[in-house]
Amino acid sequence: MLPFQLTLTPESFRNHPGARSVLRRLSEIANIFSQTAEVQSLAAHNPLIYEFVDLRDGLSESMLSFGLTILQPGAVGGEYFMTKGHFHAAQQDGDEVYLGVSGQGRLLLQSRQGEHREMDLVPGAILYTPLAWAHRTVNVGRVPLVFFSIWPSATAYDYEEITRRGGFPQRVMDQNGQPVLVPNPAFQI
């Protein structure tokens, strides 16, 4: 690997050699939203919820991986668009750091013991996610939420534990144009 430079823009990341872009549409993550009737009504349009661009491919396990996420504005039945969310799969996988680039969001976190935290993800904010804390981002604004993340290249992801738990302890809902945290009745440890 040779030294290189990028700017924190989607175009810079997408155009870098070796970049990988993953698009997540509603049909792929429909089960994370609580309002199934609203999901079905939006299914015909299958909107793009978020894009993740990373440079992980080809990196050795001892290196750092990083990526840029572009989370679209919108809601499903009043629940803001969000990422799938995951735990890091193994104890040795490591921590993760986020840097807000543009837009307005929330980072939802939960420990394996059921503790939870929420943090604002705004331009210039640096958010630290310790190992063994699941994380999910939510766009609570009217423009795309863009954030940079960095983590150990050897990291594997556990999405199934989030599904088994019924999601995260709280959901972020739009109430009169304002994001409000509400308990998730489906959540279990």
Image: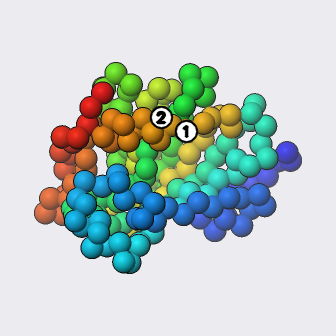
Q: In this view, does 103 lie above or below 182?
A: below
Which residue is the extreme one toward the bottom? 45
The dot on residue 87 is 2
- Whether residues under marks 1 and 2 lie with C-beta atoms below 8 angstroms apart, the answer is yes
**At which x and y percent is residue 3?**
82, 47
Residue at left offset 62%, top offset 35%: 155
Kind of residue at disc 2: Phe
Residue at left offset 47%, top offset 26%: 132
Tell me which corner region of the image, top left, top right, bottom left or bottom right, holds residue 182.
Answer: top left
Q: Is residue 132 left or right of residue 74?
A: right
Residue at left offset 77%, top offset 42%: 59
Kind of residue at disc 1: Tyr
Task: Count neighbours of disc 2 (C-alpha within 10 A) and say few if under 14, some if 14 to 19, many if 20 or more.
Answer: many
Residues 114 and 123: in front is: 114
Classify mark 2: helix, strand or loop.
Answer: strand
Tell me which corner region of the image, top left, top right, bottom left or bottom right, holds residue 161.
Answer: top left
Tell me which corner region of the image, top left, top right, bottom left or bottom right, holds residue 116.
Answer: top left
**At which x and y percent is residue 61?**
74, 33
Q: Distance between the residues labelled 1 and 2?
A: 6 Å
Task: Count neighbours of disc 1 (C-alpha within 10 A) and say few if under 14, some if 14 to 19, many if 20 or more.
Answer: some
The dot on residue 157 is 1
Q: In this view, does 136 lie to the left or right of 57?
A: left
Residue 39 visible in the current orientation: yes
